[in-house]
Image (cartoon, rainbow, N blue to C red):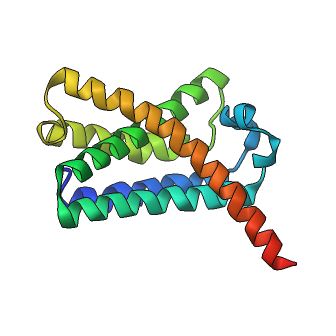
């Protein structure tokens, strides 16, 4: 499943659609990450660059896995898959907790969660071995998701500063 063309095409597409939804309905007050990394990230341009970098990273990871199919790339794509799935569950949980639909929740419910459940049902034997393997991937993926968002926002911040410098 992870090496299939369907997975290689669908995962990046639904992730990009999810990012588009987040960008279009950008609301800095909705994100808990901003409390930890500072006010300089309350910027639509920074968020745009971060989403673009994260989308490109997903596209590169699944494409390389499809072309070269090695165990390290396979693990990277499974971690990427679980990170996106966990992120979508987080969107839903925070929306329920705050009692309002936050950016990213609609695409999570309509696209990412159904695809993730389908991929888990059809391809779980291809992704991991046993419950312990799944839990290991979930644990690592949660950490990777937090670090990826953090690094994406920092990178977006630096790209935004670089772009402002060249606009002068």
> What is the quadrant of residue 10 in the picture?
bottom left
Horizontally, residue 91 falls left or right of residue 45, namely left
In the rendered image of this protein, does residue 5 appear above or below residue 93? below
Residue appearing at x 54%, y 60% in the figure: 53
Q: Residue at x 20, y 51 (%)?
A: 2
- Residue at screen point 17% across, 36% down: 124
Residue 149 in percent (x, y) is at 56, 44
> What percent of the width, then of the height, locates residue 141?
39, 35
Q: Nearer the viewer, residue 85 or 137?
A: 137
Does 138 sit above or below residue 55?
A: above
Question: At 66% across and 50% down in the image, what residue appears?
Answer: 154
| Picture coordinates of residue 115, whole percent (x, y) | 31, 45
Q: Return the residue found at the far right.
A: 168
Q: Is residue 96 above or below residue 4?
A: above
Placement of the C terminus among the 4 image quadrants: bottom right
Q: Left or right: 4 with respect to 46?
A: left
């Amino acid at each position: 499943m992870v090496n299939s063309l369907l997975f290689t095409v669908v995962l990046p597409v639904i992730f990009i659609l999810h990012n588009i939804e987040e960008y279009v309905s950008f609301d800095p007050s909705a994100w808990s990450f901003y409390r930890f990394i500072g006010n300089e990230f309350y910027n639509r341009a920074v968020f745009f660059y971060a989403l673009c970098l994260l989308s490109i990273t997903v596209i590169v990871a699944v494409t390389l896995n499809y072309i070269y199919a090695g165990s390290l790339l396979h693990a990277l794509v499974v971690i990427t898959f679980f990170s996106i799935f966990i992120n979508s569950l987080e969107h839903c949980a925070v929306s329920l907790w705050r009692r309002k639909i936050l950016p990213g929740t609609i695409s999570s419910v309509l696209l990412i969660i159904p695809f993730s459940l389908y991929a888990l049902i059809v391809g779980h034997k291809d992704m991991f071995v046993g419950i312990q393997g799944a839990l290991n991937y979930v644990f690592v993926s949660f950490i990777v998701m937090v670090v990826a968002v953090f690094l994406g926002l920092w990178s977006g911040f630096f790209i935004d500063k670089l772009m402002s410098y060249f606009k002068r």
